Amino acid sequence: MARSLRRLAALTVCLILLCSCGNSAPNPADVQFTAMDTFMHLTAYGDNAQAALARAQQTVMELEKSLSVTDPGSEVFAANNANGQPVSVHSATAELVRFSLSMSHRTGGAMDPTVYPLVRAWGFTTRQHRVPSQAELDRLLPLVGAEQVVLTEDTLTLSPGAMLDFGGVAKGWAGDRLAEALKQAGISSAILRLGGNIQTIGTKPDGSDWVVGIQDPDSENMLTRLSVRDCAVVTSGGYQRSFTENGQTYWHILDPSTGYPARTGLTSVTVVAPSGALCDALSTALFVMGPDKAAEHWREHRDFDAVLVREDGSVIITAGLEAGFSLMGGYGDREVTVLR
């Protein structure tokens, strides 16, 4: 865990450096805080940027209170512990549940919001890591699946024993809410760093693209960089949260169909799209799918772009990123395949 935290800190620092605007940019407004178990760093430009960021921070804190799986006062905690009884939820929670279920359907269950019983069994929520027995996983797997959730306009009901966890989509969804609020406040240039999630508003103040780095899964160095504007960039990788037992590494991205960490030949997936929630959900789902099915999904939908890093170090990118993609120094010999 300490190694994972160091890598996250290094990634955050590199993103800050890559996304900086230089000395010629106007002075930014800035806020840093921890929420959703993530260090968040929001930067915006404009006359009322500081006040807008203060409201944005409050928005994140309010979302966390509703969505936390460990806070007894949250709506998600209430639903998870209702033993099959309906729980009243606010419209924001219902919206996130609805979106998550739609992404579960779209991805064939590769991203599933009901995977929490499995995540908890592996100890990723408590940091008391363990390898569950096959018998335990077999008992929990029937609790996983979108069919375990019934949602009406303002009521959420889970099958007894089923549990929701929005760790695979909540930060992206929150990023969308923050970007919308800042735009409504008149902010036209901002970058929101929500851990491994990046949400950009417009361009840098000088009109140039934001430059976002993607970490090499095997080190703390930056493997590639992307030039982007007014979109989200979200990376999921096995290196972000993992533990080792008896020489075997287990990471937090689980395959909902098996209950085990997904091993599909990928070590990281980065998704780029206007919607942070879509990026967040797909970065997990494509990791679980593996490179071939991920390519099929992109060709079928074409509403996102992606960077896939294979276990052998080779890189796959979708055609929409080709113009703004480059390998960082020291990685120029990596094989890069462009999907068209």
Image (cartoon, rainbow, N blue to C red):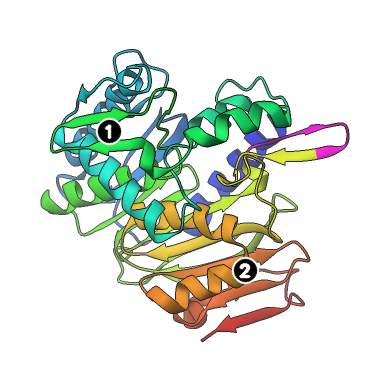
Q: Is residue 215 visible?
A: no
Residue position marked by numbered label 2 in the rendering: 291
Residue 57 has which mark? Answer: 1
Q: Is residue 223 visible?
A: yes
| Relative vertical location of residue 318 with respect to residue 99 in this rendering, above or below | below
Image label count: 2
- In depth, the one of 208 and 285 nearer the eye is 285
Quadrant in the rendering for residue 209? bottom left
Percent across and percent down for residue 12 are 54, 45
Q: Secondary structure at mark 2?
A: helix
Q: Residue at x 30, y 64 (%)?
A: 230
| Horizontal side of residue 6 vs 84, given as left or right | right
Percent across and percent down for residue 52 are 18, 41
Task: Judge the density around disc 1: few (<14), some (14-19), many (≥20) Cα neighbours within 10 Å.
Answer: some
Percent across and percent down for residue 137 are 64, 31
Q: Earlier in the sequence, mark 1 or mark 2?
A: 1
Residue 76 has which mark? Answer: none
Tell me, yes or no, whether the two marked residues, 1 and 2, touch with CB atoms within 8 Å.
Answer: no
- The residue type indicated by label 2 comes to Pro
Query: What residue span does the magenta drawing correspond to?
Result: 241-248
